[in-house]
Image: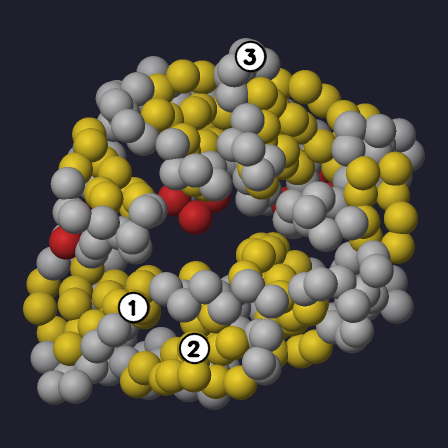
Amino acid sequence: MAGRPRIRLVHLPDAVVAPSPVPLNGSSDAFDFALRREGWIAFGGFTVWGMPVPLEGESFKVGRSFGFLRSENPRAIWVTDGHRSFEEGQTFLEYDGGARTVLDRVELPPGYRMFDARGNDAFVHDEHGREWRLDRAGGHLKRISYADVPALPGERRLALGREWAFIDEKGRSTRVDPLPEGQPRPSEFGSFSPDWRYFAVDLDISDRNRAIPSMIDIAQGVVRYEPVAHRLAIIDCVNGSVAVAEGTFDNFASQFVWSFDSEWIVFSTPFAPRGVWACSVRDLKLEWIDFGRRHAPGPLVNVSDLV
């Protein structure tokens, strides 16, 4: 069926494409995110699917959910059950794709969305984007900030605000230097390196006052598409310093994917669909990997240890 996502195995940097060892061709929705978990890989868009690890057997459908959240359980993710709206009060399910079972559930009051969970606490946004801690046992809400949400052991988390900061597992904060140029994309488009030393972020350096035509007008040829310049920034999580890679890419980047040694970043750009970008943390120079006439894949997930 035309338009359905097809999961493929791509060898870089030679751009050789092969069938996936485990087919995943059953979704009628495009995938926007992919995440490695212990025992499986989660693929998400409007519907969440899973692929077993090792890459053997059959893929499986998790359920209807717009995206998912990473769980503190390394085998699990959080998904919505898809039956209740934001206004009614959503239910989030903690799902273990290795065991293919629901481990936990969080019932939210109307008007809140969950962005994280730790034990008996759920961390939620209200309709104005403010952060709250929800005591799941008592149902009490307490106003907090991002900085009040601790990182998991050995990890860091990004605290957004007038200034950015990284928070470690003990609640210690490292302030991020001012970004040299551009408007950063939302934090979900950023990505920590596997060793938690670096954070990659997409910077929009285009004119913020420019007129933005609709995609319908562009598709119908009413107006001409004009490239929108973006750059890649690498933030050192230890000292907060910011370095911007040489070169630009068109419009937004997809999910950043790191090599396991935290030395390379790879990402695709939907408005430049015939290749992918790669960048060395040491050299800080964007390199284009051309796929010729083929469409480049997205989202990407690193499976170099599995093949």
User: What secondary structure is found at the residue carrying circle 3?
Assistant: loop
Tell me the CA gap for discs 3 and 1.
37 Å
Mark number for residue 117?
A: 1
Residue 238 in which image quadrant: top left
Mark number for residue 85?
A: none
Image: 140 above or below 267: below
Residue 172 in which image quadrant: top left
Label 2 sits on residue: 94
Residue contact at pointers 1 and 2, CB within 8 angstroms = yes
Rendered residue at 43%/77% (across/down): 94
Tell me the CA gap for discs 2 and 3.
40 Å
Depth order, front residue of 101/204 = 101
Label 3 sits on residue: 283
Three-letter code, disc 1: Ala
The N terminus, quarter of image: bottom right
Who comes first in sequence, dot 1 or dot 2? 2
